[in-house]
């Protein structure tokens, strides 16, 4: 952990362990419609430090695209859904942070999509900063 990191936008892992995902997740994360194009995804990545683009159909999660998944040669009009991965680890708001950390440790991506108990409705995003061992807060 970064010594002296007292940012109100971060919570150290040790402090977060007794909590649930719902208490730490970023609710209503940025997302794009499921029918978005690669141009939309590229624009999302250019305009922010966003590492993951979430595709939704209304509130139903359809998949996630990380920066490295996009073929740089693919046409801008290509449907983004072709690059979305819908088979990723997810958690619910009731998941214990300790359990979420186990999933994060097995994943190359330090983000977990948070779905409602129905397994479909996007509820949030859990973000972990490995270099400082903190969770991102909004």
Image (tube, rainbow, N blue to C red):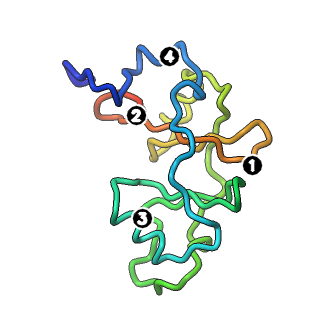
Report if the CB atoms under discs 1 and 3 are less than 8 Å apart.
no
Q: Crowding near pointer 1: few (<14 within 10 Å), some, many (20+)? A: some
CA–CA distance in space, label 4 to label 2:
14 Å
**Element assignment for label 1:** loop
Q: Earlier in the sequence, mark 4 or mark 1?
A: 4
Q: Of circles 4 and 2, which is in front? A: 2
Quadrant containing the C terminus in the rendered view: top left
**Element assignment for label 4:** loop
Along the viewing direction, whichever of 83 and 38 lies nearer the viewer: 38
Q: In percent of the image, x 60 and y 28: which residue is there?
A: 22
Q: Of circles 4 and 3, which is in front? A: 3
- Quadrant in the rendering for residue 102: top right
Q: Earlier in the sequence, mark 3 or mark 2?
A: 3
Badge 2 is on which residue? 136
Q: Earlier in the sequence, mark 1 or mark 2?
A: 1
**Element assignment for label 3:** helix
* Residue 57 higher or lower than 103, as above or below: below
Badge 4 is on which residue? 17
Q: Earlier in the sequence, mark 4 or mark 3?
A: 4
* Residue 120 higher or lower than 137, as above or below: below
Report if the CB atoms under discs 4 and 3 are less than 8 Å apart.
no
Report if the CB atoms under discs 3 and 2 are less than 8 Å apart.
no
CA–CA distance in space, label 4 to label 3:
31 Å
Where is residue 99 shown, x and y percent of the image? 59, 25
CA–CA distance in space, label 3 to label 2:
19 Å
Badge 1 is on which residue? 120
Report if the CB atoms under discs 4 and 1 are less than 8 Å apart.
no
**Element assignment for label 2:** strand
The label on residue 44 is: 3
Along the viewing direction, whichever of 84 and 121 lies nearer the viewer: 121
Where is residue 11 shown, x and y percent of the image? 38, 23
């Amino acid at each position: 952990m970064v010594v002296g990191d007292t940012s109100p936008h971060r919570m150290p892992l040790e402090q977060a362990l007794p909590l649930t995902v719902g208490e730490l997740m970023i609710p209503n994360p940025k997302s794009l419609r499921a029918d978005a194009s690669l141009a939309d995804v590229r624009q999302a990545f250019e305009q922010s430090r966003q590492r993951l683009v979430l595709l939704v159909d209304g509130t139903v999660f359809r998949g996630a695209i990380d920066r490295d998944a996009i073929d740089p040669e693919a046409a801008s009009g290509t449907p983004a859904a072709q690059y979305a991965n819908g088979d990723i680890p997810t958690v619910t708001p009731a998941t214990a942070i300790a359990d979420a950390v186990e999933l994060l440790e097995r994943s190359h991506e330090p983000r977990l999509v948070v779905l409602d108990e129905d397994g479909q409705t996007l509820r949030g995003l859990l973000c972990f900063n490995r270099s400082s061992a903190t969770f991102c807060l909004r």
